[in-house]
Amino acid sequence: MDGSQLNSHTTQNHCDNNPPPELTGAFEKYCRIVSEERIEQLLEGYAAFSQDGPLTAFVVLWLMLYQRLHPKGTLEVAVRELLWGRIRSFVRLPEEESPSANTSAYSQARTRLPVEVAKKVCDMIFESLHDQPKMLPGLQRPVFLLDGSTILLKHTKELVRAFPPAQNQHGSSHWPVIRVVVAHDVVSGLAMRPWWGPMSGPGAVSEQGLAKQIMRWLTESSVFLGDRNFGVFSMAYEAQQNKHQVVFRLTDARAKKLNGGTLPKAGTDCSVRWTPSRDDLRTNPEIPATAYVDGRLLACKVCGKNGQWMTLYLFTTLELSMEQILELYGYRWNIETDLRSLKREVRLHMLEVKSTDMAAKELVLAVAAYNLTRGTMNEAATVLQLDPRRLSYSQAQDTINAALPALAKAATDQERNVIIQQMIKVFAQSKLPRRARRSFPREIWPRPCPFPKRKVATKRNAAKPKKAPIQSAY
């Protein structure tokens, strides 16, 4: 199943008589959204971070964002940006004195930065870039895609205690694992601040529980799209309590229960009242037994890319036609590419940190850096009159990184406009191809490893006594 794209228009050529296009880089957006005065206000009450030193919180936050935007992303790269980048003018040092090229001061400043300040900066960037959201046809509210993923962490005592490694019948894994849920705007691709928790252990959290926190945090009435993992009563009830609308895919069992004990036939579009089951009340004690959610049950027959027909069972609280609901649910595929961009382009496969606070700061600021690139992509798409989803995120990031030195050296507005015009031309050639989505089994080629795999000792093996060696009589 595929969702239709937003209406695209032909690219406009900007001549010299037209005003220059609105296109800014990540640093300009950061300075516009996150000013030094606002950071000082956020730091009130936090005595651990001093603003009197050369590296202020404004400088440290940008360097952490720059690390995620840079392909290498090391501490050394951030310090080189401090020495020669545009952030150099914000360092509080005499003009004749240059910052040290050593990374120790920056590393200590990153550690002292409060987690709540990093979260609020991430929220500020998202809210500023999402100030005027683009609406889908027929909807007067933003639409968000829900999905979850996992991130590996370094093996330290603190992280293992906070995020226990996964376990199975063979024992415990080595890497701590963090469960993350992110909501992406369906049109712009901007991501809200993620919510996370341990995947294993006594304090393990579910994707549904994290998604509920996102619904509570978002005060604006919105629409949430989710697959079968989110198509449960507790999610629909939470959305109703926070005045949100939903389009959730249902499992066959839940569709059968909502339809009175039989699977609905293809083409079914009926009003239903969803009530909680005993399992729903047991796993969600905050839900009253008299709770219910009124909506519609849809059974849509669609043809997959492999030519096989299948029936999708959807639950929605929207008053749209079946064709519009099916088209809207088709946008859910975008979350797969969004999560891939988050993990690959801002390197969220594994967080190289040693504490829970640094893990939190790296995670939220990585999403903030992702949004800064998305903001430039949306500006370019507006100039080109394209759907922002048509642009490749990786190519857009390469274009921005390549243009940064030239933009920094531009002495006049005319030179800057010439560079922006060149960026617009490159963006116009960075569109994703329109090709059919192919389905493959989830298989990977194992990486060659010349060393034997390290085994984790289990209690069962440790309890077994070692056999005495057999002595030969000869």
Image (cartoon, rainbow, N blue to C red):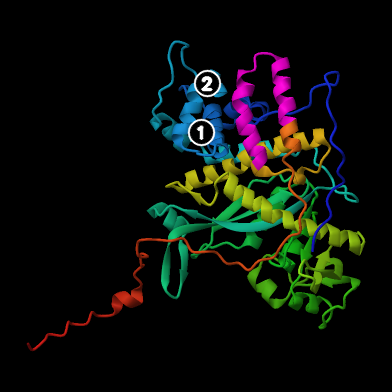
Question: Foreground: 455 or 224?
Answer: 455
| SS at mark 1 in the image | loop
Quadrant of the drawing holding the N terminus: bottom right
What label does residue 88 carry, if any?
2
Disc marking residue 46: 1
Which is nearer the eye, 288 or 259? 259
Front-most of residues 385 and 151: 385
Badge 2 density bin: few <14, some 14–19, many ≥20, Cα 10 Å: some
Residue 286 appears at what percent x and percent y?
68, 65
Q: Position of residue 155 (x, y in %)?
A: 40, 54
Compared to residue 17, the image places residue 324 above or below, namely below
Q: Magenta-highlighted stretch: main secondary structure?
A: helix
Q: Helix, strand or loop at disc 2?
A: helix
Give the residue drawn at x 53%, y 46%. 360
Q: Amino acid at mark 1?
A: Tyr
Q: CA distance from mark 2 to mark 1?
A: 25 Å
- What kind of residue is marked 2? Arg
Q: Looking at the image, is mark 2 or mark 1 nearer the viewer?
A: 2
Q: Residue furthest left?
A: 474
Residue 414 among those drawn in magenta? yes
Q: Residue furthest top?
A: 96
**Residue at 50% in and 38% down:** 73
Q: Note whether residue 241 is visible.
A: no
Q: Residue at x 85, y 62 (%)?
A: 326
User: What residue span does the magenta drawing correspond to?
Assistant: 395-424
